[in-house]
Amino acid sequence: MSEVKPSIQLFSYPTSPYAQKVGCYLKYKQLSYKFVAVNPLNNAEIRFTRQRQVPVLQIGEQWRKDSSELGLWLDELYPQKTIMPVEQADRAKVLLIDRWISDSLIPTIFRRAVEWENPVDSILNGWKLSRAVSDATPMPRYVRLMWPWGIKRAPFIVNMVKALDLTESIPAMTARLQREFVEHLESGPYLGGQSEPSLADLSAYPIVVSGHLMGMRVKNSLLDHPVIVEWSRRVQSHLPDNPLLVPDRLLMRTHL
């Protein structure tokens, strides 16, 4: 009799960049899982954790949080198509790049939500996000309409943005991140000079491409750099056309 595999459930908001990382880990490993959308107004779906942090990954009767730690947990339980290198030096390098993604790359998304370079574009982008969240967990119309302003003032996002160097303009910040990203490639096909995608690539990929795939209006994008575009295409070849947690119908594009 074949062994029954434990069910895998990913709890989060569909637009969370941290959850998108975990979604890419699962999709790269070709693991079947159920995405359980969490209502941001009450977080009822994760009350069993007695906290409000997303994403939460439940495998069988166990659950854990923290997106990067979830990648390590998945590699421990499902070593096929590993996302961590074998050599300790390479593992340390991948984890260091993943920390850069969490501390530098992801906060740029939130900075754009707080600092509106173009108010019309920012509002339209916010409405796209609210549509994706409400599609998964229906919200009142007035909440959807006010979503861009709510995100702009959300304490978690505001505090993360405050940790950035706000004297650096957004164009200068983007140019710097492009340079750092290319440096992290180390002339290799994948981050850290690795020959195969690792946790770092799968963490960065949805952050880099999600706005493009969802049809966001974004100036000064990392995808303005040809080396990053080519890296994105290489990672894309290891994932399904829709690497995000939103349904296909909400994507404006499927390729770079």
Image (cartoon, helix red, strand yellow):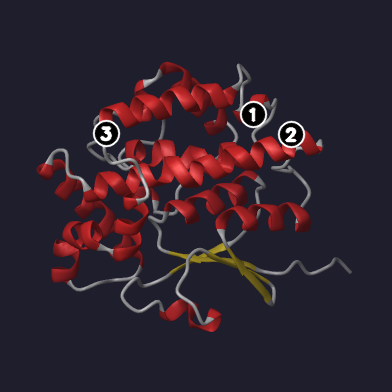
Label placed on residue 59: none
Which class describes the residues within 10 Å of circle 2: few (<14), some (14-19), or many (20+)? Answer: some
State the residue at coordinates (61%, 52%): 26
Q: Determine crowd level at label 1: few under 14, some 14-19, many 20+ residues with C-alpha closer than 10 A.
A: many
Q: Quadrant of the N terminus?
A: bottom right
SS at mark 1 in the image:
helix
Name above or below for residue 78 compared with residue 205.
below
Are the two marked residues, 2 and 3, in contact with CB atoms closer than 8 angstroms? no
Q: Is residue 188 left or right of residue 52?
A: right
Q: What's the amino acid at mark 3?
A: Ile
Q: Which is nearer the eye, 105 or 127? A: 105
Task: Quickly name the residue at label 1.
Answer: 192
The foreground one among 97 and 65 is: 97
**Secondary structure beneath disc 3?**
helix
- Callout 1, which amino acid? Gly
Residue 156 x, y percent position in the rendering = 35, 62
Residue bearing mark 2? 90
Q: Is residue 17 left or right of residue 82?
A: left
User: Tag 3: Cα neighbours inside 10 Å, few (<14), some, or many (≥20)?
Assistant: some
Residue ID at (27%, 39%)? 215
Q: Which mark is residue 170?
A: 3
